[in-house]
Amino acid sequence: MKKIHTLCVSIILFYAPPSFAESPVLDNEEIEGIGYLLTLSLEELLEQKIDVAGKSVSSIKLDDVHFTGNALRLSNSQSSLSVESVDDEMMEARGLDNVVDAVRSMSGIISGDSPAEPYSFGMRGFTRDSVKLLFDGVSIGRSTLNMRPLGTNNLSRVEVIKGPAVLSGEGTPAGTLNIISKKPNAQLNDHIKSFLISYGDYDSSKQNIELSGPLKQKGAYLVNIDRRVSHGWVDRSDFESMNASASTLWHLNDDVDLTLSLNYSKDDLPGYWGTPLIPASAAQSPEKVVTSSTGLVIDKANRYKNYNVEDYTIDSESLWAKLDIDWEIASNIHNHTKIYSYGADRNWRNAESYIYDTGSGQIERDRLLVEHDRDIWGVNSDFHIDTTIAGKENTFATSFEYRQSKFDRTVGFEPVNFFVDFVDLQNPEPGIFYAASIDLRDDKLDQKTAAVILEDSMKYSSKLTFNAGTRLEYLGFDFDRRNFDGSLNQRLDGSVFQASYNFGASYELFKNSYIYAQYNSQHGEIAPSLRLYNSSDVSNFSPSDIRQYEIGFKTSLWEDKAALTLALYDIKEESKVVNSGVLVNNLQKSKGLELSGRINITDNLKLSGHYAYTDAQYGNFIDTFSNGDFSNKTPINVPDHVAGLWLSYDQLFDLPIEIGGNMEYVSKRYRDGANTSELLDYTLFNAFIAYTKDNYRLALHARNLTDELYVPWSDQTYPDQVLLGAPQTFELSFRIAF
């Protein structure tokens, strides 16, 4: 696979740029045929202005058409979904340089790291495996195993659909995250060059180059190269990532467009997997960022210490190749087909558990090795048909999906005692991994998916719109888990036929104000269900069952100078697990509300905010990892309250200067399923000042202004340590386009 990566990167870096050629002028009919790709007007593109002033404040647009799970092409006002997005202008204005930060800036969403998974998300009372990850609308799987800190400079937007409302791919209760890359723009009459550089604390820097323009044969190209490096705010936590993408659009005729895209990513993540919790008597500067019956604390003197080995490894390499075919079959019939391939290699070699030994006062460490080899290929084809039924406007969409996924995983650790060595609490000598002491075992999951999705939207009257959809799918799976001696530990080989469906309606109460309601029923992903099932008997196996009720309100006021959305939801997930040979039905449920709003106080002063309340609870629930009974407890990493506020003022002193900032608040969360330990609530403040003139922008971003010591996330499989949030940092960036 690495040879393929090298070849494709060579194509990206050296093949696309020589296509700078003549600048064709497209006629109006050609422009109209590819209009769905455009995000800027021709006048804006030709002027080459950087215009992101005021874009840091969230925008709620009822006429916006979201990309995720929207084969019907409904606007937000017609849709009965909770949709939130952050586009490229907002990401630049806010200084969000990776996808994780972009998602975390949305309403009601939290995120965090743990040794088991570099990046996880939580929303609507569900976390970890409960979030589905898409790239350009193609499902990669759960975010826990597939999320990386991708840069945002090659993205057009990041979208989130809240709750289990998307029929594309297998279901998840929390929501769906769609990472949408930039595409070539066939309206361009000239070549555009954009360059960005930045520098910040801990020798953090990023460089981005973007080239785009027209091609001879009625087409366009786009090349984006992004690199980020940092020494990290913790000792020995260097970070480096590189993303190179190239795409070419061919406008074959008035009816058919082809877009070929390649996206290569490589990263080496910082090797910080936590700070040990210790008795207050052993701490030089005790800080109580968690509460527990044992009274353990964080020693602020250890805030920047790294307890990992010297030769740690946390790296990945991935490649996307995708062909998009857009075909206007008739004036009212459109087809969009994607043919794609995705491959990823990921490696971990770390000391990940840090346990304080009360006898010696030292930190006891383990060794853990993990390798992933991931390959996916498939095809999605959507047909969109506009028509009338009984004199009423009707839109019908049918989608066909077929994919094959192979996931091979190698796991290694010291299988007898698990722990390997001790290091000093205050002056940890890193040592080395010495993999010779590690025994290995292998897991694999091969999966085939075939699905048909049928959706319909009828405008029953000028005010009332009905939506409905169903997903009929076949899932075939072959799951093997091996022992350290290579013998078979577990084998699950079978198939599942199942149906998911949703119903929704939207009604315009008065001009630009809508109420909506939806109900959906889905089935969870195969992979988490197999992992929890833990049995060789497949006769009782089935993916989890998920259902959601939701009602909401969306409005735009005062000629779009203000907007408001409100959602009330009720979600339930039921899953079967095998514990000590006994089949158990687990239940997790949540209900809550989400409120988002924005207002242009003046032309220059803008304000937006959001608030989410969540009431999450287990029903009958047995945890198969700890054999703990968590029935009627609150799930870990689920806050009752999440709130945020953004404010910006443009044209300060009648100059092209913008100042702004935000506040984000997360209430306390439980660290363990038994609810015996809590993470304290925290409030973060960020600020920026930017000077934007014509085609260049200079910006200074300050994050965690008060240098708050906080813990954003917890992993109950690592109960003796927590990963602290980043301290106060500053970053200066400069971008120019011409």
Image (cartoon, helix red, strand yellow):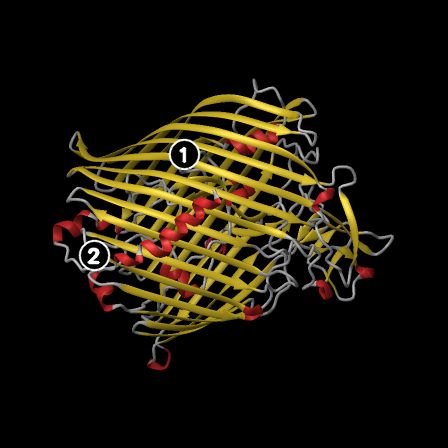
Q: Is residue 195 above or below residue 520?
A: below
Q: Which image quadrant for residue 335?
A: top left
- Where is residue 373 shown, x and y percent of the image? 53, 39
Q: Secondary structure at mark 1?
A: strand
Q: Is residue 186 above or below residue 161?
A: below
Work out which residue is located at the far top of the displayed protein and give it.
539
The answer to whether residue 125 shows anywhere in this view is no
Q: Is residue 311 above or below residue 539?
A: below
Tag in front: 2 or 1? 2
Residue pointed to by mark 1: 519
The numbered mark at residue 643 is none
Residue pointed to by mark 2: 187
Q: Is residue 352 left or right of residue 501?
A: right
Work out which residue is located at the far right of the displayed protein and give it.
359
Q: Secondary structure at mark 2?
A: loop
- Where is residue 351 shown, x and y percent of the image? 70, 50
Local crowd at mark 1 within 10 Å, few (<14), some, or many (≥20)? Answer: many
Q: Is residue 272 above or below residue 504?
A: below
Callout 1, which amino acid? Tyr
Q: Quadrant of the C terminus?
A: bottom left
Label 2, label 1: how many angstroms apart (C-alpha)? 40 Å
Local crowd at mark 2 within 10 Å, few (<14), some, or many (≥20)? Answer: many
> Residue at left 55%, top 69%?
203
Q: Is residue 271 left or right of residue 601?
A: right
- Where is residue 660 shown, x and y percent of the image? 44, 70
The answer to whether residue 473 shows anywhere in this view is yes
Of residues 60 and 431, the one nearer the viewer is: 431
